[in-house]
Image: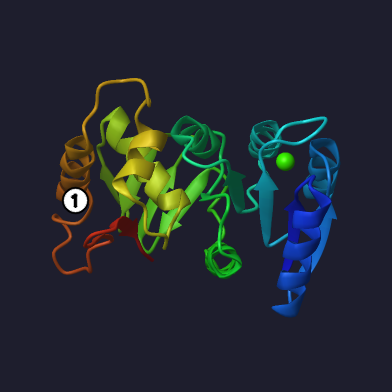
Amino acid sequence: MKILLVEDEHRISQAIKKGFEQEKFLVEVAYDGETAWDLASTNDYDAIILDLMLPKKDGLDVCKSLRLEEIHTPIIVLTAKGDVSEKIEALNCGADDYLTKPFAFAELVARVRALCRRPKLQQGAVLKADDLVLDMRTFEVKRDGKLIELSRKEFTLLEYLMRHKGQILTKDQILLSVWDYESDVLLNTVEVYIGYLRNKIDKPFKTKKPLITTVRGFGYKIED
Ligand code: CA
């Protein structure tokens, strides 16, 4: 496992680096946002640990730039204590997880391991989950070769689930990614739309296994 650690406070970054090396990770360190961007956009890492307050280019900018360039390396952001808006902003900029300072080193390791284990995002224009195919070029969805009519919202939701195939997605994550954060939607909305999708994708295919599963207490996922 090779990770990029972006933290400008030398004392902290050295401690984290040492800790991860003891856990058999390879660690590269960047002390400012520009170096982080250079390294992350040219090398392959299994995960990035990203501090937000950085010289030259802040963490949110680094995160945004990477996602704009279609670089989907998992990112865990280190945030200041209790700043909720900062966390939401980080997730909106494409971070996968966050951890509030000060944190226990063991927790950081556990979270980074979890990120590294995540299946890579499905990219490209044609997404697949078992016999379900979603084509971004034609906006067509087919299961077992049969065309399925979806509304625009259902399509966006399905695309999000399929891009994160195999991952458990919380209602919050779904809401932030599929619905505009500003708009007045309720958590209940996610449930309702998951229901609509099930009626179209799983229910008519009774002899097949359901593709959308509920992970009680956590959220939803779509599987192969
Ligand atoms: Ca900092």
In the image: residue 38, left or right of residue 183: right
Q: Determine whether the residue tagged by mark 1 lies in a helix, strand or loop.
A: helix
How far across and how far down the image is residue 159, in percent?
Answer: 40, 43
Residue designated by label 1: 198
The answer to whether any part of residue 43 appears in the image is no
Colour scheme in use:
rainbow
Image point 34% across, 58% down: which residue?
Answer: 222
What amino acid type is highlighted by mark number 1?
Arg
How far across and how far down the image is residue 11, in percent?
Answer: 80, 55
**Residue 133 vs residue 224, the one in the foreground:** 224
| Image quarter of residue 150 | top left
How far across and how far down the image is residue 89, in percent?
Answer: 51, 32
Image point 50% across, 34% down: which residue?
Answer: 92
Can you say whether 213 is above or below 133 in the image? below
Image point 13% across, 64% down: which residue?
Answer: 206
**Residue 10 vs residue 184, the one in the foreground:** 10
Residue sticking out furthest to the top:
183
The answer to whether any part of residue 37 appears in the image is yes
Can you say whether 181 is above or below 139 in the image? above
Give neighbour class at mark 1: few <14, some 14-19, many 20+ (Cα, 10 Å). Answer: some
